[in-house]
Amino acid sequence: MGIADKIYESQLWKSIFRHPMPTDRRNRVVVMLTNFFLHLHPVSVRKQGIALSYTWCMGGTTFFLFIVETVTGVLLMFYYRPTLEHAYNDILALRDVTTLGILRELHRWGAHAMVITVWLHMYRVFLTGSYKPPREFNWVVGVLLLVLTLLLSFTGYLLPWDQLAIWAITVGSNMARATPLAGVEGPGASLLKLNGVSLITSGSDAKFALLGGRSVGEMTLNRFYVLHCVAIPLAAALLIMIHFWRVRKDGGISGPM
Amino acid sequence: MHHPDLTPGVMTGLAWYFLLASVLNAAAAAYIAYMELVSEGASRVGLAPKTRKLPNWLVGAFFALYGLAVLVILGRDLLPNATLIAYSLCALANVVVALTAGADAAHFAEAHDAGHGRGSEVHGPSLDDHQPAIGLGKPMNRTLWTLIWAIIAVMFQAMGITYALGGAAILPQFIRDGVDAVSGPTTFFVFSTIAFILMLMFRKIVSNGIVAWAGVNAVLVLFGLSMTDWDFRDIVTKPDNVPIVGMIILVGYFTWLSLRRAYINDSRMALGLPNLEEMEPEKTLTWPDLVYTELICMVALTIFLVVWGIALQAPLEQPASSTVAPNPSKAPWYFLGLQEMLVYFDPWMAGVVLPGLIIVGLMAIPYIDTNKAGNGYYTISQRKFAYITFQYGFLILWVVLIVLGTFLRGPNWNFFGPYEYWDLHKVIPLNNVNLSEIVWLQVLGLAKPENILKRESPGFLVVLAYFLLVPPLLAKIPMFKKMIAQGGWLRYFVLAGLILFMASLPIKMVLRWTLNLKYIIAIPEYFFNI
């Protein structure tokens, strides 16, 4: 009996994986059923459905990038303080002082890549008609995930607190000022009055709600930080779970119905 | 403003860039010369074993030369001119592969003509023969195309060596001036739309691998030479713009791949054959087939991200200042299509209503597309309307506008040609007029009425007519008639509404370019401008 076999037969190995290495047909089936992480998959899949020239692997890539963003994001949170006093200098230190200083690069490039892979995933799903019954609702969940991905990227854009950040968010959030009825420069907002007092002012409109102030400032930084690190990732994680669950429930991996 | 077009750093970069272009073409030549060139699925119908083989010595020599180059670079402190020596080794490897592939292809052709190596003598057609996918037409001449890609590989390599040795080939000034002169938002958008239409009309030709590879080479040359221009380089190499260059490449490749697969599928189904996706209905175990694919993808992606992270530093500009606004101030790149819409619409439309409708419209797609065909496989002919609408929206109204907003919009959101200096003081005369002014002042020769509603009545009429009259008129078209019969009126009106909103952007563009029209309805008193 070789060392490898001894390890596979050991109590420790068995207690963790519950079965030997998946080298025969039986164990290859069992591993998919007993492993927590693998049980996301079915035991077997359509050959055509996993061909790269068909699926482009973009959904899986997006999920992997989400994990990369989560891990590097948590590590970045160790170094970064979302205040006007510290934010920019913490980013500078991340670049110049920290050992292995490519954390922010991994996070930023991963984020850009994730936006692109989400689009390409949706592109493939559309071009193969994979949103058609019975997968209609999962497409809707996917569109919500697209929105969350863009919001994640948008809220993260502000955090370095440099010129690029503040002005990109200023340009983006200026749109909120023009929300119909809810923005101070939106059509119809001036009609909303109570006893002659405007309900929608620059201190109470959609832009103010988004920024936590009349312009991009410390409250915006705090607001975007919380959204970026807690609220949106949690919402995205929930929707991702539903998305994967529905892939399984709605007929499995895409292919001719 | 004059900046040096070429610096030593740029020349080194271009030398390696053309080395890459050369190795890609050498690989293409080797692929056509040696690989089993069969159509999708041909390997599954049991063709004869391949008669051509990539020579082991060639593979060995290629990797030995590249490996030696890496060693030379690692030991660059000990060797004078190490980079140039390493470069020469790589270049030699490329040229050897290109020339060998060309020579072997010619030899195979002779042997083939003499009657040797024909698998068909034994059982069926040989893999030696090029079997184009069904629908893609005649087989290609393998010898000819091996030679062509080999020659191009050698030519790219010669360009690379020129840059490595300090030669200064730059994009001729008259070409740059010419491109800048004809560039503009109008020409850019119209040209993209025409290219989109041509791509769909001639999808058989576009699907052809030879044509596609020729296109790749054209882009490689054009991009490489464009990098010799300071202004072009300045914009393209901004760290945050690099992902967009990557996005263009990926979107281009996947658009081509899907177009090709759709065209092959359509041709197959027209002949009553199963489409590519139906050819392998059997299942396979997830472990190891899918799990290992996922693992390999994750490892490759991790390496890619780490290399990218080391090679390119994330941008960090001056500390935020709410008083010093950069010019241009741009939103994050994925929103630049929306920012571009601000040229034609007010923020409440471009920034709120239209983005909202994009999201709602995307979610509505599965519920308004009642076409049962095309579920789970690539096709164009079975779902033409859905395909064209989505492709136009994604490729032209989203990706092309992002490219425009990123690379061609400079200070004050003015348009700049790809080789044009971003001059802060460029003045573009704006003499846009509102519909009310055209109607009351120019057409009727009257003064503009005081009453807002009366003043804007022409605009209201146009907008109401657009949304109320167009859907019933479109409903008379047979295609929409069929849709209504299948899905009912509610689905149809949702669809028509979404399409009309989507079409409002190109319509507004054309009106701007032709009539200088600013607003159809202009009530700035209530921020209500359309």
Image (tube, coloured by chain):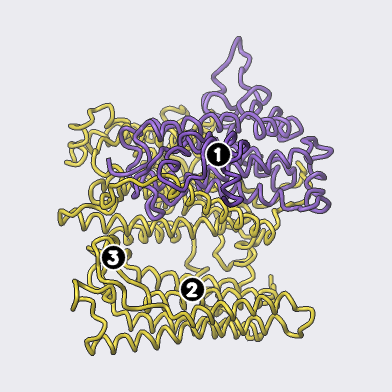
Chain colours: A purple, B yellow
Residue at numbered disc 2: B24
As rendered, which of B21 and B121 lies closer to the eye? B121
* Residue identifier under label 1: A149
Picture coordinates of residue B483 (x, y %)?
21, 36
Residue B442 spot, x, y in % from top left: 40, 45
Three-letter code for the amino acid on which mark 1 is drawn:
Thr
Dots 1, 2 in contact, CB < 8 A: no
User: What element does badge 1 sit on?
Assistant: helix
Disc 3 target residue:
B39
- Residue reaching furthest top? A195
Observer-side mark, 1 or 3, equals: 3
Tell me how far mark 1 sits from mark 3, CA to CA: 38 Å
Q: In which quarter of the image is the N terminus of chain B?
A: bottom right
Residue A234 in view in this figure: yes
Amino acid carrying label 3: it is: Ser
The quarter of the displayed image where residue B481 is located:
top left
Badge 3 marks a residue whose secondary structure is loop
Q: Quick check: marks 1 and 3 in contact, CB under 8 Å?
A: no
Left or right, B129 with respect to B4, comes to: left
Mark 2: which amino acid? Leu
Calculate the distance from the C-alpha at mark 1 to the C-alpha at mark 2.
34 Å
The answer to whether B61 appears left or right of A93 in the picture is: left
